[in-house]
Amino acid sequence: MALGGLAAVANAEAQQPVSGLPTFAGVRTFVGAPYVPGCVTLQADIAILGVPFDEGTWGWPGERYGPRDIREGSQDYKQFDLKDGFYYLDRDQHVLKGRRWADCGDVEVSPTVPAATNDRVTEAVTRILAQKAFPVVIGGDHSITFPAVRAFSTPSLMLVHLDAHLDTWTSAPGNVDHSSPIRRAAALPSVKKIVQIGMRGLANDTEASDNARKLGTQIITTEAIRRKGLEWAIAQIPRADNIYLTLDVDVMDPSVTPGTGTLEPGGLRFEEVDEILTTLPSKGKIVGFDVVEVNPLRDPSGRTGQTAARLILDFLGAIFH
Ligand code: MN
Ligand code: MN
């Protein structure tokens, strides 16, 4: 090889993006996306925002480590160049080709002052939307959904809520906990419809179900999905102009996502949740989503964070193609 050839190879290697590193190397951002602290100046189609917050939990704490676990779990899907998109062998197809990514890092939390943290979540999502990027919020316990949805002024928003739990409890007056974000979100002027999928088992009492009934949410239990099939369940989801998805990873079976605060046996399989997510864009425009309740302190295997990362990528692929 001529000297010029070697120099060209060395030059090409020097230009390798950080995402070309092996999975164990490099600073952790979601799939190696460029780090844009605070999403101050975004030139991106997709913006990842971490909310390391678990002060809303009634169960096991540790969801504050969720964002960094999901980022860690995403390293297996890191690409040499994110512009190439992601390849599926099954369909011999690329998705997300040419899409521009940013990881905005984590929202600044104020421990023991949840209202201040919530305000920063709303501010950050508002900033992402103002710069025409698509927000992907990674939690954190489920209480962070309310401040995230609050950022949308979109009229006729349909909330699609995947969870084992209704999250419509009354709880203590003025609470901002993870047992009531759906009740709070229902009161937002933008939210016109709520579909709750995967509710199951003994996890939901009459306080939560009475509240859900009063709010008029549409409930599709996991047991109903077992009786009537997934296709039936997907057909039940109505069309809407704008859809926000909130995914509590405990909607899946504890064997799939053991790293979460509130386990309930008999959950959905990965493939079922994946199917719901990838068909959801056919129901209307997806305007944003969050993935919550990943608790790595209960899952040393890391499978919960990786499963969350994979669902995020599959869903984004279906939204953007
Ligand atoms: Mn929940
Ligand atoms: Mn739950």
Image (spheres, helix red, strand yellow):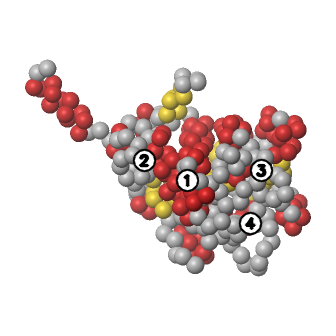
**x and y percentages locating residue 215 in the rendered image:** 84, 62
Which residue is labeled 2 in the image?
33
Q: What element does badge 2 sit on?
A: loop
Q: Residue furthest front?
A: 300
**x and y percentages locating residue 123 in the rendered image:** 54, 66
Which residue is labeled 4 in the image?
179
Q: Is residue 124 left or right of residue 142?
A: left
Q: Earlier in the sequence, mark 3 or mark 4?
A: 4
Closer to the camera: disc 2 or disc 4?
4
* Residue occupying the point 56% across, 72% down: 117
Closer to the camera: disc 3 or disc 2?
3
Label 2 beta carbon within 8 A of ligand 1: no
Q: Earlier in the sequence, mark 2 or mark 4?
A: 2
Q: Amino acid at mark 1?
A: Pro
Q: Earlier in the sequence, mark 2 or mark 1?
A: 2
Closer to the camera: disc 3 or disc 4?
3
Q: Are marks 3 and 2 in contact (CB under 8 Å)?
A: no
Which residue is labeled 1 in the image?
300
Question: Spatial distance from mark 1 to mark 4, Cα to Cα?
Answer: 25 Å
- Kindly tell me whether residue 315 is visible in this rendering: yes
| Picture quadrant of residue 2 | top left
**Tag of residue 265:** 3
* Residue occupying the point 59% across, 38% down: 314
